Image (cartoon, grey):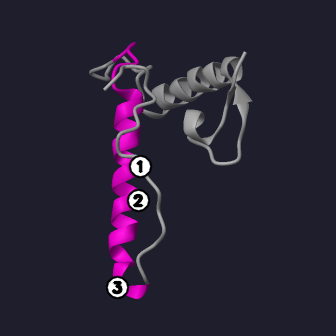
Amino acid sequence: MTSSTAAGNGHVGVECDDIQFDRNRAAVLEFLYELDGRGSGEHPQHHTYTQLAENFKLAVGQLVLDELTRGWHLSQRPVIKIDFGADDSGAGG
């Protein structure tokens, strides 16, 4: 059993083993499923988990980018470290 840290699970300072990380991922996907209303027969992607995590990442990323843009004139450039090549979705490249 290995331990996931910031590089493996996206949380700085939070550690969990791979089994807990997988449990957490499943719980988060279930949360996103409900949040997106996919339990409703009216949803075009009813009963699917397709693109849930990707859509959430895009939405959160857009919110972060908008906030960064709004306050850009007020401060120095923030220190943000992002590995643009990282893909922890398990899908590869």
Which of the 4 quarters of the picture holds residue 26? Answer: top right
Residue 43, percent from left and from top: 32, 23
- Dot placed on the residue nearer the N-terminal end, 3 or 2: 2
Circle 3 sits on which residue?
Answer: 73
Image check: 15 left or right of 68?
right
Residue 38 inside the magenta-drawn segment: no
Circle 2 sits on which residue?
Answer: 64
| Mark identifier at residue 60 | 1
Image check: 29 left or right of 89?
right
Which of the 4 quarters of the picture holds residue 30? Answer: top right
Q: In the displayed image of the protein, which residue is found farthest to the left?
A: 44
Q: Give yes or no for contact between labels 2 and 1 (Cβ–Cβ under 8 Å).
A: yes
Span colored in magenta: 46-75
Residue found at x 56% / y 39%: 7
Crowd band around label 1 with a 10 angstrom C-alpha radius: few (<14), some (14–19), many (20+):
few
Quadrant containing the N terminus is top right
Depth check, front residue: 74 or 85: 85
Q: Give yes or no for contact between labels 1 and 3 (Cβ–Cβ under 8 Å).
A: no
Does dot 2 land on a helix, a strand or a loop? helix
Residue 41, percent from left and from top: 35, 16
Depth check, front residue: 26 or 43: 26
| Mark identifier at residue 14 | none
Kind of residue at disc 1: Val
